[in-house]
Image (cartoon, helix red, strand yellow):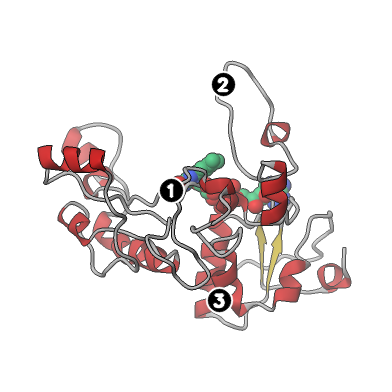
Amino acid sequence: MPEFGRQGTYDVVAIGSGFGTLFFVEGLLRKRPRVRVLILERGRANSHAWQLMHDKNSDIDPESTYRRDPAHKRWNFTIGLGGGTNCWFGHTPRFHPNDFRLRSIYGVLQDWPVDYVSLEPYYLAAERHMSISGSEEMGAILPRSGLFPLPPHVTTSIDRIMRAAQPQFHFPIATARASKANGERGRCCSSARCSRCRISCIGPGRFPLIGPTLDGLPAEPLARTFTRPFCAKQVSWL
Ligand SMILES: Cc1cc2nc3c(=O)[nH]c(=O)nc-3n(C[C@H](O)[C@H](O)[C@H](O)COP(=O)(O)OP(=O)(O)OC[C@H]3O[C@@H](n4cnc5c(N)ncnc54)[C@H](O)[C@@H]3O)c2cc1C
């Protein structure tokens, strides 16, 4: 491991570099720009070109990472820099307000300790961060305090038939697939192969979030937040 990783001291160590880490680090750096963050990633940084050539997102088979039992569900995820940002389809639905109150409304399971209203600003921030395409009409079902960054996708003929039958329920779905060219992102080509699409409209190159998220970090240290084991000498909790 490079000296940077061996001897550095960090305020925060994040394990893995998927969505969870990226949104967390992005928010942390916005609030505390000088904080030193180390991201430890098990997988390699397989380039978008590598993924297209090998027709897979990672050189590590996810099934090799957990105990396999035919009676149980198989899991699919990406071990590699960016984690699930490599393989996701770009669907970005919000939970419905009622989803947070299942016990109160439907008498099943439990209510959440948070509600839709308190999460709404975070939904909006995430949608802005990911340049989500969506229809403002969606606000009739999922109330919104701001606009979608990109306009909705053009509906298909099947969408239009469904909408004619139930106009109050059918809207173009919110998605990270870009409805129009946007910065480094091209427009969605509707290949239905989002995880290994050549256009890669859900983000710049392979990592939709890593670029904007890690603007606050020098690129070089990011490249060194790597995979070999090393011992933390001291851990501080925030
Ligand atoms: C094919 C597919 C399509 C999907 N499409 C969508 C979608 O359209 N919309 C949606 O909302 N969600 C989608 N998901 C789900 C979404 O990808 C996950 O919910 C999300 O990635 C979870 O984020 P995470 O940060 O918790 O984990 P991950 O993104 O899985 O990140 C985990 C990170 O930890 C690393 N790691 C693992 N073990 C170690 C270790 N021992 N040491 C260090 N690092 C380690 C991994 O390499 C990875 O970088 C999809 C998932 C798959 C598999």
**Nearest to the observer: residue 157 or residue 163:** 157
Q: Are marks 2 and 3 in contact (CB under 8 Å)?
A: no
Q: Where is residue 179 drawn, in percent x and y?
A: 37, 60
Among numbered discs 2 and 3, the one appearing first in the sequence: 3
Q: Is residue 87 visible?
A: no
Query: As displayed, is residue 85 above or below residue 12?
Result: above
Residue 184 x/y as whole percent: 53, 70
What secondary structure is marked by label 3? helix
Q: Secondary structure at mark 1?
A: loop
Locate residue 114: give its quadrant: bottom left
Judge by depth and name the residue closer to the eye, 144 or 196. Answer: 196
Q: Which quadrant of the structure image shows residue 223?
A: bottom right
- Given residues 123 and 163, the one toward you in this image is 163
Residue 210: mark: none
Number of the label disc, if any, that sits on residue 72? 2
- Residue 16 percent coordinates (x, y): 66, 55
Instruction: Using a 10 Å C-alpha cutoff, classify the residue at mark 1 as few (fewer than 14 neighbours), some (14 to 19) or many (20 or more).
Output: few
Tell me how far mark 2 sits from mark 3, CA to CA. 39 Å
Q: Which residue is mark 3?
A: 29
Tell me the kind of residue under disc 3.
Leu
Q: Amino acid at mark 2?
A: His
212, above or below 137, in the image? below
> Circle 1 is placed at which residue position?
190
